[in-house]
Image (cartoon, coloured by chain):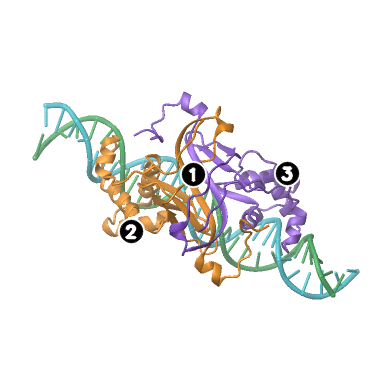
Chain colours: A purple, B orange, C green, D cyan
DNA sequence: GTGTTTAATAAGAAATATTCCTATTAACGA
DNA sequence: TCGTTAATAGGAATATTTCTTATTAAACAC
């Protein structure tokens, strides 16, 4: 049986050492893109990341941003999130955490506290071999939207 | 404090009654698109849904597929998933469940069993008002890929 | 049933988002 | 410092999603 705890921390990642360790070339682009995400608190889109890094590195191309984001995601340093309003958003996963997304305004909030266990994968035992990450995504209404907008969303606990 | 159980079932949805109840017109397109997803076990893309329904309804347009999927998602009947290999995938959420996604081949498996509770939202109490859904997404390697490919993914439990 | 109202659709254009192609650059090991 | 080659820039190509507008068909009143 595969059973995964939610809380798995990892932090203080030095991108230079990390890339080197993985046998990847330590390019300015990779380091800067990693930093841009690690230092952001805003779950930026690829476009936002591009604009942010390009200020320091005018030759940067969009292709490099996407390629690097894919690399970082594969390494487990970054997570791609589906945003209710189209387009992908990216978030540093140097520290394991989860997300709350407001269905009204689209704001994404980090949720570091975690308790309990992941869904048991017993029913998938013969089909699943290794767990890489467990991510909980909670959707609902943030306080602001709950009070200001007349929403019509079915909520948990209601019929 | 907001605390949400994972397991919240809902099933046997009659799309006609459901749309009517919500004050939405019961169009052939809506009913057929809903059925296509509800009967699929394959987490189809918008394109796949389009092709499937168009066999029965040749005049269907892609725009209607996207529009209807957005409506169904808003009603909580359908969930949009980010697929590792670009593009969105859709899944019927008539019965609450979770997902395992293989990072190698991209296969998505349903995971109905669930235990534990969602991450505590205590830290977000003042920012979050209402929970609409709790979804757990587990990533890793399916048995097939774990045994056949030489993967280089950091896995949970390893350093 | 018939007519009226208007939400929903089809069609294709437009806007976005993402990936691909190729020549060039620069990281790294010798 | 030099050679090798992974990685990048630039732009084209593709894919995905949304928008615009005329048309259609649900829903409802009669």
- In this orientation, which residue lies closer to the viewer: D19 or A151? A151
Tag 1 near tag 3, CB within 8 Å? no
What is the x, y in percent for residue B139?
54, 56
Question: What residue is drawn where x is 50% and y is 68%?
Answer: B144
Residues packed near mark 2 inside 10 Å, few (<14), some (14 to 19) or many (20 plus): some
Query: What secondary structure is found at the residue carrying circle 3?
Result: helix
Residues packed near mark 3 inside 10 Å, few (<14), some (14 to 19) or many (20 plus): few
Query: What secondary structure is found at the residue carrying circle 2?
Result: helix
What is the x, y in percent for residue A48?
63, 43
Per the rendering, the mark at residue B116 is 1
The residue most toward the top is A147
Per the rendering, the mark at residue A86 is none
**Subunit of mark 3?**
A
Tag 1 near tag 2, CB within 8 Å? no
- In this orientation, which residue lies closer to the viewer: D18 or A45? A45
> In the rendered view, would you say C21 is above or below B37?
below
What is the x, y in percent for residue A77?
65, 52
What is the x, y in percent for residue C14?
48, 46
Relative side of B82 to C10, left or right: right
**In front: label 1 or label 3:** 1
The residue most toward the front is A1
Relative side of C2 to A112, left or right: left
Q: Quadrant of residue B40?
A: bottom left
Q: Give the mark nearest the N terminus, 1 or 2.
A: 2
Relative side of B63 to A40, left or right: left
Q: CA distance from mark 2 to mark 3?
A: 46 Å
> In the rendered view, would you say A21 is above or below B79?
below
Q: CA distance from mark 1 to mark 2?
A: 37 Å
Per the rendering, the mark at residue B52 is 2
Residue behind mark 3: A55
Relative side of B38 to A90, left or right: left
Question: What residue is drawn where x is 53% and y is 67%?
Answer: B145
């Amino acid at each position: 049986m595969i059973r995964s705890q939610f809380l798995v921390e990892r932090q203080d990642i030095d991108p230079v050492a990390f890339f080197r360790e993985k046998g990847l070339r330590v390019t300015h682009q990779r380091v800067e893109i990693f930093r841009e995400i690690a230092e952001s608190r805003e779950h930026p889109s690829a476009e936002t990341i591009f604009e942010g890094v390009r200020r320091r590195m005018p030759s940067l191309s969009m292709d490099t941003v996407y390629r690097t984001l894919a690399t970082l995601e594969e390494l487990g340093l970054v997570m791609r999130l589906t945003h209710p309003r189209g387009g992908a958003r990216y978030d540093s996963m140097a520290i394991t955490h989860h997300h709350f997304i407001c269905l009204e305004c689209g704001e994404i909030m980090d949720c570091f506290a975690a308790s309990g266990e992941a869904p048991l994968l017993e029913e998938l035992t013969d089909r699943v071999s290794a767990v890489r990450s467990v991510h909980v995504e909670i959707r609902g209404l943030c306080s602001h939207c709950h009070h200001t907008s007349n929403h019509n969303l079915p909520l948990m606990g209601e019929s």
